[in-house]
Structure formats: C-alpha cells, structure tokens
C-alpha cells in the first residue's frame, strides 16, 4: 500500500511509530480488518492539531548547551509540559530528579528531570521503550535563520524551527501514535514506555547513571528499545540504522621543558562538556623569534610534523596496525551497500563538495561507516588572529579525533596506551589477547617524535573514549520496523549506519542488555544542529 502520495513526512513519522507498535505486538494486519485505514485516516484528519503541539514545543527555548539559569528554567518547563502530555494520555509518569551539574567556572546548575513514563503493563504483550530528548542546540535568528528559530513556520511544505527534527518532532510522532490508538479506543498492541531526557545535547549528563539505577526496575520488563534521533541517508527514502561509529579524542602536546614551571591549560572540545584541565610543565611566556629563532627546537614545528604523520592524502591512517581490528566485509554486507539509495553526484552537490575521496557509493559509505577515520580538530596556543605576530607560541596541544568503527573499542586503544608507557621502544604491544598487536596512537607519535631528536617534550593523552554501537538487522524488531516502513512508504528502507557517535544506543544496549534499534524519522537535509532546521510536513 503506497501511502506517500497521501501523507506528508511528519504524518508518516507518526504512522511509522504506530505501525511498528502493531508489528511488534504481532497484530495481524490483514487488509480486510479496516484497522489500518482507520488509523491512517485519523492521523490525516488531525495533522493540524499535531503541528500545533509541535509549534508549542518548539516555542520553548530548551537549549541545554549554554549553561545559563534562564535556559535551564526553560528546560524544566519543557519537561513538565511533556510529562503533562503523557499524563493526559493516561500514562504513569515519573520525573526522576537528578541533582545539579557543577560547571568548570564553579557555578552549579540544576539538571532537568528525566521522564520515565509507562502506558499499559499487560504481561502478555511485549514492551517497547522509546527514547527521545527535548533539549535543543542553541539557535539565534542572526545565525542565518530565514525564519525565527523558536517560531515553527511552514514554508513550501516544510516546518522550520529549532528542535523540529532533533528531536521534538520525532518524540511527538510517538506520542501522536499513542493518542491515535486512544482516540479510536483501540487497545494498545504493546506496552509502551518513554524515556525522555533534557540534556542530550550537553552529553546526556546523568542518563547513564539513571539507566544503571533503573536497570532492574523500569527497564526490567522492556523487550525492545527504540531511538528516533538521527536521519535517513536520503531526502526521500526512509532508513533503519544498525550501527554508529565510536570515537577516541586524543591531545598531543609539545613543550619546551623550561624550569619545570607549572602552567594550566584548559583543553576544551565539543563532545566533552564537563571540562578538562591538564597540567603541563612549561615556560609561561612566548619566545620572540628574533631572539630565539634558529637556536631552539620550536614546539609548533615539532607538533606539525607529528600531526602530518597521521593520515596520507588518500585519507588512509598511517598509524601501523590501526586497520588490523576492522572486521572483514561479508557478502551480506556487500549486498546491503549495493541496495542503498545514494546518488554520489547529488550527495557531493548537496554537501557542496567538489569531489570526495572515493568514486563509488559503496567505497564512500564503507569509509564513513566501517573504516576508522582520523581528524585533526585544532591547535591550542597557536596564533590565529590576522597580522604578523613574530614570537613562537607556547606549548601547543593538537587535537586528534579518531572515529572507531563497530569492531573497535576505545579500551583497545586506551589499554595499549597504558601498555605503551612500558614499551617505549616501539616493539609490539601484546595486550589482553589482541593479537598480534594493536599499535597505538601514542606509540606512533613517540616513534615519529624520537626520530626528530628534538629537545622538547611530548605528552599524549586520551580525553574521551566513546564506544561504537552495532545491531543485527535480522533482529525481531528490525524485521518488524522493516515491515512497518514498507506499509507506510511502499518501499524497503535503506539499511544504514551512521558515521557519527550516538552514545545513547550503546549506553542502553550495554547496561540493559536489551535489543536496541535506531529508527530515524528525519530526512538527510533536515539540518539538525544547523540553521534552518526543519521537518517535512
Ligand atoms: Zn538529537
């Protein structure tokens, strides 16, 4: 049954959620039952009402990124509104209090509660737990928005507003699906639980702790966990996500070992918001290049040589052994890549990139999803203003970001780093059964650095390690979602992975040991975190 001709995407989102519940409840969807038509019709008829609720939610500036008391109040207001909405649906709602967050500048801010809600507890039915978040990234009209970011505005069949796709729209799609069952006095085919948080964009502060605490309580009866917090690969074709990359964030520092004075540098990075401080021994003044140029090993020159040794011009990581842990490709995987709907030329054009490193769809996707990548994110202490300053900069941490693929884990790298401190000679590191060896970023850098015979010192540290996540596409709930999408959209979904890191999936999977699925409800051009974020109406 082809529905896309009659329903828009935000309707289709509610329908996908609804159909998934039916499929997971193993409700027979015979075309004669009439149930589907009734559900579809209800959603069609109530579309304006659903958009109105999204408008009210978007109007709340629930920005969790900027640590400002006024915005925290908005977050509390947002969570209370969602809790009320769920209560009105007849759900049992708990708002878990999570204390406060200590900011690096010493101020303390309250953490918005995480909503744990429950609708139905029939032991004969499976229980589906939906996760979503109601906080948003910062947005201001003068960032380049064409409409006001906190006023949901429809333009050419698209609903623009901060949070429309990330993640208020998808959360509402699930809630609307529940209200549809209720309005039509249809028994829910499954028991539903909701976990809604308000700090996702700030690193899901306190979520992991809560999941651990609730593992044997709220999560004990859960069969399936569904996350709708990422995007399709295409503008038109729906997708199911079965893997995300992890990441390791390293810093490497080169400094002149001068009189062992202590100076403190704050290493900030987007993904590590609780703040990080590291003490390094160094001189606390710049060196004038007229006075010292030519008679010193300059830290910046050493650092650039180190950073230049990491990746070649074809994107290949030059750290020995880093590809040894990548799982070999299977035939099933090859077929999956082949079936994905991606026009390379269009992809380049929509991303405003003249040419990617790879010429085929398959190679491009594999390098986004199943092979590690390494990025250099910045140099602190470098002179980055216009003009011609002529002193050498002080100690200069370079930031390296390493994407892990599903068969790799941060601990592999971390443990080797630990082992490495005992194996400075560059010999093979045989740690914990990873054979033959897994060379480490620090080992490689140490080898490159020692070849330079510099008088400077180097220090490498890993400041963040997040695990990759992977799920089986043959899992019951993936098969159910596949059928649901086929019914709503009339096409098979793309089975995709995500090149970025979405820690919540791994947190749920590792702690609860339940089946976790990512069911994206937004299109690739929705612009999450960006200006003019939208969801197709
Ligand atoms: Zn999100």
Image (cartoon, grey):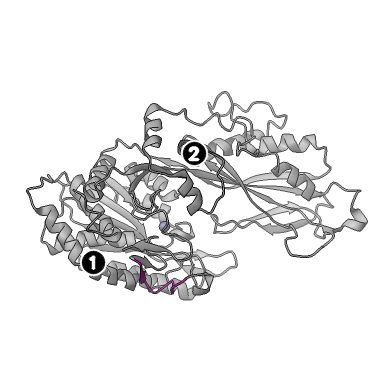
Q: Position of residue 292 (x, y in %)?
A: 90, 54
Tell me the tag on residue 535. Answer: none
- Ligand 1 has an atom within 8 Å of the beta carbon of the residue at disc 1: no
Q: Mark 1 or mark 2: name the one nearer the start of the chain.
A: 1
Q: Secondary structure at mark 1?
A: helix
Q: Are marks 1 and 2 in contact (CB under 8 Å)?
A: no
Q: Is residue 53 visible?
A: yes
> Does 150 appear in magenta?
yes
> Does 353 appear in magenta?
no
Q: Is residue 158 left or right of residue 148?
A: left
At x 40% / y 36%, what residue is drawn? 337
Question: Dot 1: few (<14), some (14–19), or many (≥20) neighbours within 10 Å?
Answer: some
Q: Secondary structure at mark 2?
A: loop
User: Which residue is label 2 attached to?
Assistant: 405
Q: Position of residue 499 (x, y in %)?
A: 48, 45
At x 51% / y 36%, what residue is drawn? 371
Q: Is residue 317 left or right of residue 535?
A: right
The span shown in magenta is: 146-156
> Where's ligand 1: which quadrant?
bottom left
User: Which residue is label 1 attached to?
Assistant: 47
Kindly give the residue lying farthest to the front in the view shown. Answer: 345
Q: Nearer the viewer, mark 1 or mark 2?
A: 1
- Ligand 1 has an atom within 8 Å of the beta carbon of the residue at disc 2: no
At x 14% / y 64%, what residue is drawn? 183
Kindly give the residue lying farthest to the top in the view shown. Answer: 436
């Amino acid at each position: 049954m082809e529905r896309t001709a009659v329903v828009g995407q935000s309707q289709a989102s509610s329908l996908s959620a609804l159909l998934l519940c039916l499929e997971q409840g193993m409700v027979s969807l015979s075309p004669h039952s009439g149930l589907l038509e009734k559900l579809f019709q209800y959603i069609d008829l109530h579309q304006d009402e659903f958009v109105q609720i999204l408008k009210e939610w978007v109007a709340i500036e629930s920005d969790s990124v900027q640590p400002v008391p006024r915005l925290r109040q908005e977050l509390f207001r947002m969570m209370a509104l969602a809790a009320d909405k769920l209560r009105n649906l007849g759900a049992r709602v708990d708002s878990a209090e999570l204390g406060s967050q200590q900011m690096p500048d010493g101020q303390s801010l309250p953490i918005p509660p995480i909503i744990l809600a429950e609708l139905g507890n029939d032991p004969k039915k499976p229980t589906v737990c939906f996760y979503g978040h109601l906080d948003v990234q910062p947005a201001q009209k003068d960032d380049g928005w064409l409409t006001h970011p906190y006023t949901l505005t429809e333009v050419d069949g698209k609903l623009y507003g901060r949070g429309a796709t990330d993640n208020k729209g998808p959360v509402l799609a699930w809630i609307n699906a529940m209200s549809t069952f209720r309005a039509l006095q249809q028994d829910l085919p499954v028991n539903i639980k909701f976990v809604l948080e308000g700090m996702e964009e700030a690193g899901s502060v306190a979520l992991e702790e809560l999941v651990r605490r609730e593992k044997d309580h709220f999560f004990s009866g859960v069969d399936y966990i569904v996350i709708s917090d990422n995007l399709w690969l295409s503008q038109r074709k729906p997708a199911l996500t079965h893997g995300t990359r992890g990441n390791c964030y390293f810093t490497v520092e080169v400094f002149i070992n001068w009189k062992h004075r202590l100076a403190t540098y704050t290493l900030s990075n987007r993904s590590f918001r609780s703040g990080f401080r590291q003490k390094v021994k160094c001189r606390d003044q710049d060196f004038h290049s007229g006075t010292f140029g030519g008679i010193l090993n300059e830290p910046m020159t050493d650092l650039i040589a180190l950073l230049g040794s990491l990746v070649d011009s074809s994107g290949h990581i030059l750290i020995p052994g880093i590809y040894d842990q990548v799982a070999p490709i299977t035939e099933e995987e090859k077929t999956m890549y082949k079936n994905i709907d991606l026009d390379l030329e269009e992809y380049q054009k929509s991303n405003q990139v003249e040419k990617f490193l790879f010429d085929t769809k398959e190679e491009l996707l594999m390098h986004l999803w199943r092979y590690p990548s390494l990025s250099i994110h910045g140099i602190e202490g470098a002179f980055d203003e216009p003009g011609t300053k002529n002193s050498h900069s002080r100690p200069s941490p370079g930031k390296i970001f390493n994407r892990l693929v599903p068969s790799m884990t941060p601990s592999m790298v971390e443990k080797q780093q630990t082992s490495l401190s005992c194996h400075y000679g560059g010999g093979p590191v045989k740690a914990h059964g990873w054979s033959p060896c897994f060379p480490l970023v620090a080992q490689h850098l140490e080898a490159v650095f020692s070849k330079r015979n510099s008088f400077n010192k180097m220090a490498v540290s890993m400041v963040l390690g997040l695990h990759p996540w992977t799920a089986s596409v043959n899992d019951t709930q993936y098969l159910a979602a596949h059928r649901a999408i086929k019914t709503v959209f009339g096409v098979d979904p793309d089975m995709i992975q995500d090149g970025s890191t979405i820690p919540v999936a791994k947190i749920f999977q590792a702690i609860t040991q339940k089946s976790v699925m990512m069911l994206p409800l937004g299109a690739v051009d929705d612009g999450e975190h960006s200006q003019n974020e939208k969801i197709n109406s």
